[in-house]
Image (cartoon, grey):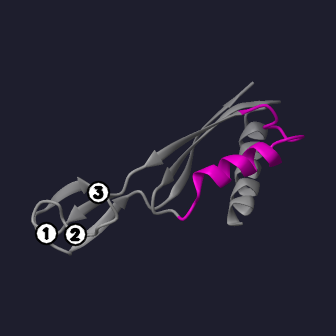
Amino acid sequence: MHEYSIVTSLLDMCEENAKKENATKVTKVEVKIGKLSGVEPYLLESAFETFKEKTICDGAEFVMNIQDVVVHCNSCNKDYTLEKNEFFCPGCKSLDLDVVDGNDMYLMRVEME
């Protein structure tokens, strides 16, 4: 379960940010998870809820924003949000695509007291 190592890193980042801001408690953690990131949102949330106990994030709200896959078509020079994992341009049907968004996970915001 690689979600455990992701949560461990996430909790470490929250701890570092809180120390920089002289905060004693994290109240909210917001992440963006791309559909192609390889992260299973349910497992990530479950791991966060389990491992946040007795850390600076104990009691923190965990918010996940799921990012659709956005591609740029090099043939028609347009960006599209893919509805399915079908990697061809919805406009011109080209296969010459670059993934612009939806393949990473980011820590977007940490709210602290």
Q: Please determine whether, in this image, residue 29 is positioned above or below residue 103.
A: above
Question: Considering the numbered disc 2 on the image, is that residue within a helix, a strand or a loop?
Answer: loop
Q: CA distance from mark 3 to mark 1?
A: 12 Å
Q: Position of residue 25 (x, y in %)?
A: 80, 30
Whether residues under marks 2 and 1 lie with C-beta atoms below 8 angstroms apart, the answer is yes
Q: Which residue is mark 1?
A: 93
Task: Identify the residue under disc 2.
Answer: 88
Left or right placement of residue 15 versus residue 75 in this view: right
Of the two numbered discs 2 and 3 on the same chain, state the one appearing first in sequence.
3
Magenta region, residue range: 38-60
Residue beneath disc 3: 82
Q: Secondary structure at mark 3?
A: loop
**85 in relation to 23, above or below:** below
Q: Identity of the amino acid at label 1?
A: Lys
Residue 80 coordinates in the image, percent (x, y):
23, 55
Residue type indicated by callout 3 = Leu
Horizontally, residue 108 falls left or right of residue 83, namely right
Image quarter for residue 110? top right
The picture places residue 3, in percent across and down from the top left corner, at: 69, 60
Quadrant into which the C terminus falls: top right
